[in-house]
Amino acid sequence: MSKVRTPRFSTASLSLPGLFVLALIMAVPAYGVEKENAEGRAAAYWLERLGPALNMTSYRGVFVYARGSSVHSMQIAHRFHNGVVEERLVLQDGGSGEIVRRGMSVVCVLPEQGKVQLGQIIPSGPFAEAFTSQLIPVSRWYSAELQEEDRIAGYDVVTVALTAKDPYRYSHRLWLEKSTGLLVKSHVRASNGDVLEHFQFTNLEITDEIPDSEFKIQSEGREVSRSLSGGGDHDTFSTAARMHGWHLGWRPEGFEPAAAPSARKGQAVAFSDGLAAFSVFVEPTGSVRMPTGASRIGATTIYMRQLQRGEKVFLVTVVGEIPPVSARKVAESVQIDEAFALGGDEQ
């Protein structure tokens, strides 16, 4: 490799004004880099506060969550009590229903014979399980910038912009309450700047004085219990992460398994880059033909593809907060293992 030659010049040939101009030229880039680094460090400080604040700050309030044409208003009470996270969410529109969480146990009271599902009313993005449980450093995948201060729901906030460095993920803007780091507003944005999802508190009280009565189920209806199981061994996955009966040939850089895959056939496997998440679901379809292609609701993409392996047909579904181009590439990279295709036991 040839060396790049640097032109030589002598400062003796420059006048005093010339030296001054040269000093400015040399100083400006350094100042710009230093300023950028300082802004990055400031943004990183707030991101570090955000993770613990989501669980360990106690508060009550009402927030609005908009995804596509769907808008929900929810009342929330949240506290960190004796080392355990407790939370109660109540639908404010579209019928009755509530979700009560204590630690990793969640009970959802479903109105109207259970027509409302957990995934339909629990916000994604910053409220996704992957986000709250492991806010990993995201500077490799997003450019973090501390922006202007603001005031939301009566609290002073700072704004952090996280701009995606590649076309395979969305950008985010987060508004954090200054004294606690609590998330009070967020945007998920496409590459053209359009806001795909929007969350914001319209009423908020940050307080440790929340009685036990605010965390008891008060709605009538069918109760569905769920356990938010923790993650598994993340280090056992290679770049081409091998699943149970199938494997991925590609996924966006930085998205790592958020939990160890189950040995049960058809079990979805989740991936997260610390900010966004998506899941891949693979199952035999038999003789049933399913619609394929992409659909998007807000920032959530659903991509379905049929894949034939031998005489069997499988349905591949990718769901998550990633652009359609990413979901399609993930789905098209799924490869079925021979034992799975033959219906035998997989490794």
Image (cartoon, rainbow, N blue to C red):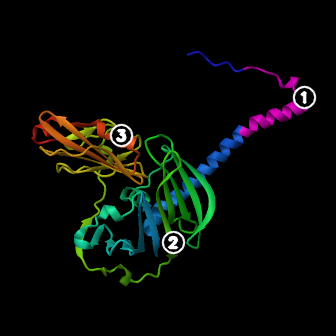
Q: Which residue is mark 2?
A: 202
Task: Identify which residue is drawn at 30% across, 37% down.
Answer: 332
**Neighbours of disc 1 within 10 Å: few (<14), some (14-19), many (20+):** few
Q: Which corner quadrant holds the N terminus?
A: top right
Image position of 203 with respect to 175: above or below: below
Residue 230 screen position, x and y as percent: 30, 59
Residue 326 screen position, x and y as percent: 38, 41
User: What amino acid is labelled 3 in the image?
Assistant: Arg
Q: Secondary structure at mark 2?
A: strand
Which is in the foreground here, disc 1 or disc 2? 2
Q: Is residue 216 left or right of residue 59?
A: left
Q: Secondary structure at mark 3?
A: loop
2 or 3: tag closer to the N-terminus: 2
Q: Which residue is mark 1?
A: 15
Residue 236 screen position, x and y as percent: 29, 43
Range drawn in magenta: 7-28
Residue 345 screen position, x and y as percent: 11, 42
